[in-house]
Amino acid sequence: VVLRSGKMGEGSDELGTALMKSFIYALTELEELPETILLYNGGAYLSCEGSDSLEDLKSLEAQGVEIMTCGTCLNYYGIADRLAVGSVTNMYAIAEKMAEADTIICP
């Protein structure tokens, strides 16, 4: 799963934010969990303190889902010290994970 924004879809930002929160919660309810969740650009905020999806991401991590957030993005937005789930990664590792994946879901 690739989360590149804090919002899902185009249009209303408020609706897009609510949809992304619902999507991440829905992942916790799946029988077959994703192997990895990659977060970059605006999606980096989702893995940081203050995120409405933080508890769901922590739940997924506790169930064995690898959570990886782009370090360049965390630094760009000045939120590296707020990362609260998963690990910091780089674009090489993100590209590698995407290239190895059978399926990529980008909500």
Image (tube, rainbow, N blue to C red):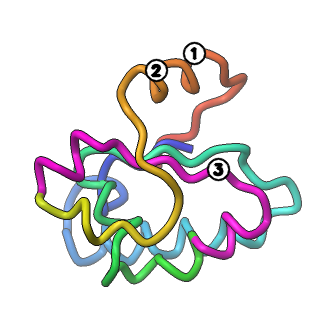
Magenta: main secondary structure equals helix
The alpha-carbon separation of the residues under discs 3 and 2 comes to 15 Å
Magenta stretch encompasses residue 71: yes
Q: Please give the name of the residue rendered at 12% of the width and 60% of the height, measured from the top-left corner.
A: 78
Q: Are marks 2 and 1 in contact (CB under 8 Å)?
A: yes
Q: Which residues are magenta?
A: 58-77
Instruction: Give the residue number, with chain letter if any, for mark 3.
Output: 66
The alpha-carbon separation of the residues under discs 1 and 3 comes to 16 Å
User: Crowding at label 2, few (<14), some or many (≥20) Cα neighbours within 10 Å?
Assistant: few
Nearest the eye: 34 or 13:
34
Q: Is residue 51 above or below residue 13?
A: below
Q: Is residue 67 above or below residue 72?
A: below
Instruction: Give the residue number, with chain letter if any, for mark 2.
Output: 95
Q: In the shown orientation, is residue 26 left or right of residue 105? A: right
Q: Which mark is residue 99?
A: 1
User: Crowding at label 1, few (<14), some or many (≥20) Cα neighbours within 10 Å?
Assistant: few
Nearest the eye: 44 or 81:
81
Q: Please give the name of the residue rendered at 35% of the width and 70% of the height, measured from the top-left corner.
A: 48
Nearest the eye: 93 or 9:
93
Q: Amino acid at mark 2?
A: Ala
Q: Amino acid at mark 1?
A: Ala
